[in-house]
Amino acid sequence: MTTMDTRELLQKVGVNLELHDQLIAYNNKLFEATIRSAPNRPAAMEYFDSAFHASHSSRVGEILDYRTRGGKSIGTFCIYVPDEIALAAGVLPIPLCGGSHWPVDYADKMFPRDICPLIRSTFGMAFSETCPYKKLKDASVGETTCDVKKKAWDLLGFEVMEVPQKKAAVDRDLWLSEVIRFRSFVEKLSGITVTADRLKETIKLVNKRRRVLQTVNDFRRLPNPPISGLDALLVSQIALSQDIQIFISGCERLIEELHQRIKQGISAYQHAGPRILVAGTPSPMGNAKVHYALESSGLRVVADESCTGMRYYRDLVDESPADLDGMMKAIADRYFSIDCSCFSPNKERIENILRTIDEYDIDGVVHNILSFCHTYNVEAGIVDKALAKIEIPSLKIVTDYSFEDIEQLRVRIESFSELLKPVMT
């Protein structure tokens, strides 16, 4: 797609070209400074670099073409929205979570400043007319994982999925009813009935996407990972924004190259620094600040516990049921296993973190907490109690998408690195 084609396309979907140019210039500058700064990158990362830029160009064209052919699409904000069901109804999910600091001030016309930067970034893009997906969706689907999100959905009139706050049998039944209701919602939107055959196909497809993500991230368990934390983050960010089949092909090429790098003894890191698990809030596309600060300070991010990490790809939907009801229950069970900090108690998350520490030989945990994300901020204390029992140091970073505090973060990370040195000897 040429530059002229891209601008014509963006104009067609109602984008403010002048402001959009500013957004893209800002995002591209940070992309070069963070993701592209990783040394010794695999050649196959070229696809993921291109996909980052395509999210505001050729991918927009693909979605527009899909809708022109009669397809429907929904904007989503959370990994609790079941992609399998939407796709089985011919509805294309479009992730709308913003990861750029540039548009946050534009959200102030409707939202207070002292709320989550993810919400401000997402709706700042919408209010500034720089989000190319604003007019490429037939509905938006939110969920009840966060108080700010819930009130944002109310304010803007979104469809909302009720995520229970506990995990007893009654909560599981409630969630199953919400998953069934979501199926009715997308069926009504598209006019296409979700059949057992269609759902079985989309379950396998979305599971395949999760499996290639699992494989890519399994390489990070190795003593000398052939892929950096920055590149692994980009792969996960791209997963939800691009065509599934094309994404899977891109991952398969990367996996093949990573196998070759292992045989050749090629590591993504110049030095064997401490092995870090990044835990907490997601890092949607455009935001790699904490990973960059850590890896440019000599630490190796070898695992991501967030919604843009293993929380998304860790669990698969059971593919054994053959009937529609059985598949719906399997989908509900898989999504109910997500260990979001909205749950109380949240023992599953502690168990998953401790297991990850063992499997990835983790030396230290860094809590990456978005400003005003109270559930993950408070729950970091609960996680730290469990870490203290196994003598794993941790560092809590509470920040937003801006780079104004990058040097302050470096100072804290350097002090944390000193704490980890005895672990490395």
Image: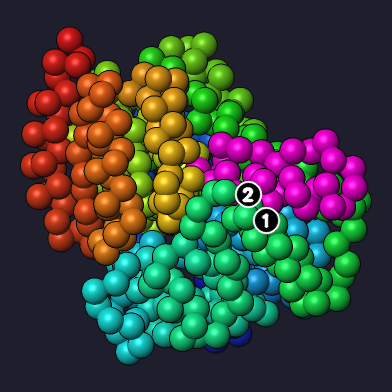
Residue under numbered circle 1: 173
User: Which quadrant would residue 190 be assigned to in this image?
Assistant: bottom right
- Please provide the residue range marked out in magenta: 311-338
Mark pair 1, 2: CA separation: 6 Å
In the image, residue 265 lies in the stretch drawn in magenta: no
Q: Residues within 10 Å of mark 1 (few under 14, many from 20)?
A: some
Q: Residues within 10 Å of mark 2 (few under 14, many from 20)?
A: few
Q: Position of residue 165 (x, y in %)?
A: 49, 57
Q: Residue at x 48, y 45 (%)?
A: 339
Is 375 rendered above or below residue 390? below
Q: Position of residue 385 (x, y in %)?
A: 25, 34
**Amino acid type of disc 1?**
Asp
Q: Which mark is residue 187?
A: none
Is 103 rendered above or below residue 351? below
Would you say residue 176 is visible in this rendering?
A: yes
Q: Which mark is residue 169?
A: 2
* Relative horizontal placement of residue 181, taking residue 146 as reference (left or right): right
Q: Pick the residue in front: 314 or 162.
A: 162
Q: Secondary structure at mark 2?
A: helix
